[in-house]
Amino acid sequence: MKKSKIIVGTLAVVWIAAGGVLAGQSVMTGKCVKVIDGDTLIIECEKNRRTVNLEGIDAPELDQPWGKEVRNFVRDMVGGENVEILVVESGDDSVVARVTVDGIDLSEMLVSRGLAWVPEESTDADLVGMSTKARELPCGLWMDPEAEPPWEFRAARG
């Protein structure tokens, strides 16, 4: 019995050291039961519902151009689907997380298709690169030369 605990403990340390779960992060699976907007989901995990804000992106608000289209795209991608959630930050009623469905990272998908902004202060080189490429094509909301970032849209409306 002691030997198996030592082996399990050692394997856990190796897994964490190899990047399995970083400090402050946890991995959960659940079912997306509601898509509120392009970057906010309700996920049911073990009979509990949590609000999940997609990490690394900011999607258009619903009353902003592209807002409803992005929400509908996200609903088509993950609505009713089982998803994996890598929690980056946890609050009382909500979490900030990377969400994958069938191995596809939802934040990356939205940015690469020009359906979400990467905040200016982002240090995520992959998302920044995908955003730059989407702007250069242009695709999605980048086809509008006057596309307004959601944080500016919210600030202008109080």
Image (tube, rainbow, N blue to C red):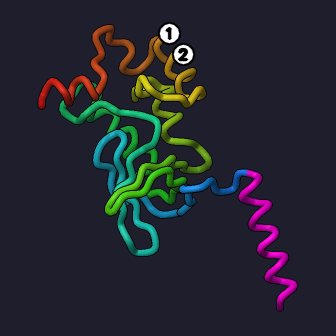
Q: Where is the C terminus found, in terms of image quarters?
A: top left
Outermost residue, bottom direction? 1
Would you say residue 123 sits in the magenta stretch? no
**Residue 108 picture location, percent across and down:** 53, 34
Which residue is found at the position 37% from the left and 58% from the top? 91
Give the residue type at disc 1. Glu
State the residue position of label 2.
133
Which residue is found at the position 53% from the left and 23% from the top? 128
Q: Mark 1 and 2 residues: CB-CB less than 8 Å, in contact?
A: yes
Would you say residue 8 sits in the magenta stretch? yes
Q: Which residues are magenta?
A: 1-18
**Residue 51 picture location, percent across and down:** 34, 56
**Residue 114 picture location, percent across and down:** 44, 23
**Residue 98 picture location, percent across and down:** 51, 46
State the residue position of label 1.
136
| Dot 1: element | helix
Q: Nearer the viewer, residue 31 or 152?
A: 152
Image height of 47 relative to 40, above or below: below
